[in-house]
Image (cartoon, rainbow, N blue to C red):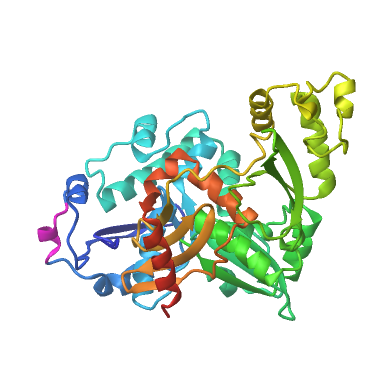
Amino acid sequence: MYGRIIDVAVIRIEKGRVVKEFQSLVNPDRFVPHEIELLTGISSESLSHAPMFYSIARELFKMLDGVIFVAHNARFDYGFIKNEFRRLGREFSAKCLCTVKLSRKLFPMHRNHNLDSVMTRHGIECPARHRAMGDARVVMDFLCKVQDEVTPELLTRAVNAILKTSSLPPQLDKETIDAVPETPGVYLFYGKNGELLYVGKSVSLRDRVMSHFSGDHRSAKEMEVAHQVARIETRQTTGELGALLLESQLIKELRPMYNVASRRHRDLVLARRVTTSTGYSSIVLEKTHEIEIDLEAPIMGIFKNMPQAKEYLAQITREFRLCQRLLGIHQTNSYCFAYHLHQCDGACMGEEPAEAYNARVEEAFAERRVKAWPFNGGIVIEERNPVTNEGEAFLIDNWCLLSCFRFTEFGQTELFKSVSRFDFDAYKILARYILNPHNLRNIKHVNINELYRASDDFTRLD
């Protein structure tokens, strides 16, 4: 089901006084899930005679015009409202004050800041919990309570920090900023001559873009970029994974001026493990910019340059009593130099059992090596928007991103062109995501032949 509003309420406050209230059930033109009915008490039958959103849109838009949008978990409610207006071809934008964030800033000593916890902590009662007007009144009561419980200075600092008031550069207008969505995604900064300055990503594009113009720059580079921005382009994604992968791809493809470190098509140094004729693990350093997975010569470590690789080999030689000859540090046909210093147990001449030596090699590279692919075949990762149920899917096998596309109730489109080979930056992003147990629910196992067929089929779609 694609998320729709079924109950909406607004309390408009001006100069500390309630000036108007609005409340209405909304017919979503679809079935209400049983769990939502249990939570809210609103059934499909009770909504059958309620107005459609377009019938209340004009009045609701007037209620929200020029406001600071205040809600508990504001991004969630704001997303629903924004999407409903967008379906009608109308853009809605407002600054958001999230009372979850406000509670955390004002009362950091408490662990839980959900609405029930806030009500208990501040003695707020609500006879109509999980209904729009009931929850809106709780938020209003919370704002009233905190004015009595904290100093005006502390409250002002907390609110300003959440709203992140910013000073825009002269070549940017307010409409440009208003058009930046609250969603996850990637933003592109362009200069006055159309040159691409910088590509960045965030789980909240609006917050991150505004932070560039806050005046509190983290570096001279960030300040320089902010002063040159004349145009902003955004590309929305459903979640953080899509934003990370899209950012990595765009930086390589478009080579922005200020993403210097990431945009270089640099050569990397691979430390591959090969087995000698006598059964010992040996390391071969390979300089490359395209990484190929080779099961016969697995990658034990990836380094930025040759000096870093050699420094690491020297370090593990000392720490794990490894052989300089087998690691390629000392070229000799006899005992390595470390053996004469009693720092090698003689693997170079077969004096140490290969099994014991090889186990130490594995241990030495445990933190550096490319992780083994944890699945027996390919996978699909899905990220879904809880408001619209739209999302993105990523087809992956052996750390290679085969394809990625955005799906909606109307079909699917390509998110960006994948390279279908091992990419070290993408690997690091995917490894952090896949190896996090919290993300397992978003991962589906697929037959490898089906995976490649799905990837091929998608590339033929237009």
Q: Which x, y percent locates residue 134?
A: 27, 47
Image quadrant in which the N terminus is located: bottom left
- The stretch of residues the image draws in magenta is 42-48
Where residue 195 sits, quadrant-wise, is: bottom right
Q: Is residue 430 left or right of residue 320?
A: left
Q: Is residue 333 left or right of residue 382?
A: right
Q: Which x, y percent locates residue 25?
A: 21, 61
Q: Residue furthest left?
A: 45
Is residue 205 visible in the rendered structure shown here? no
Give the vertical position of 396 relative to 40 (above or below): below
Where residue 46 sits, quadrant-wise, is: bottom left
Where residue 263 sits, quadrant-wise, is: bottom right
Say whether residue 272 is magenta. Answer: no
Q: Which x, y percent locates residue 362?
A: 64, 32
Nearer to the camera, 105 or 259: 259
Is residue 379 visible in the rendered structure shown here? yes
Image quadrant in which the C terminus is located: bottom left
- Residue at figure coordinates x 85%, y 45% from the top left: 307
Nearer to the camera, 184 or 248: 248
- Residue at figure coordinates x 45%, y 60% from the top left: 395
Q: Residue furthest front?
A: 277
Nearer to the camera, 110 or 422: 422
Q: Which x, y percent locates residue 122?
A: 39, 32
- Residue at figure coordinates x 73%, y 21% from the top left: 352
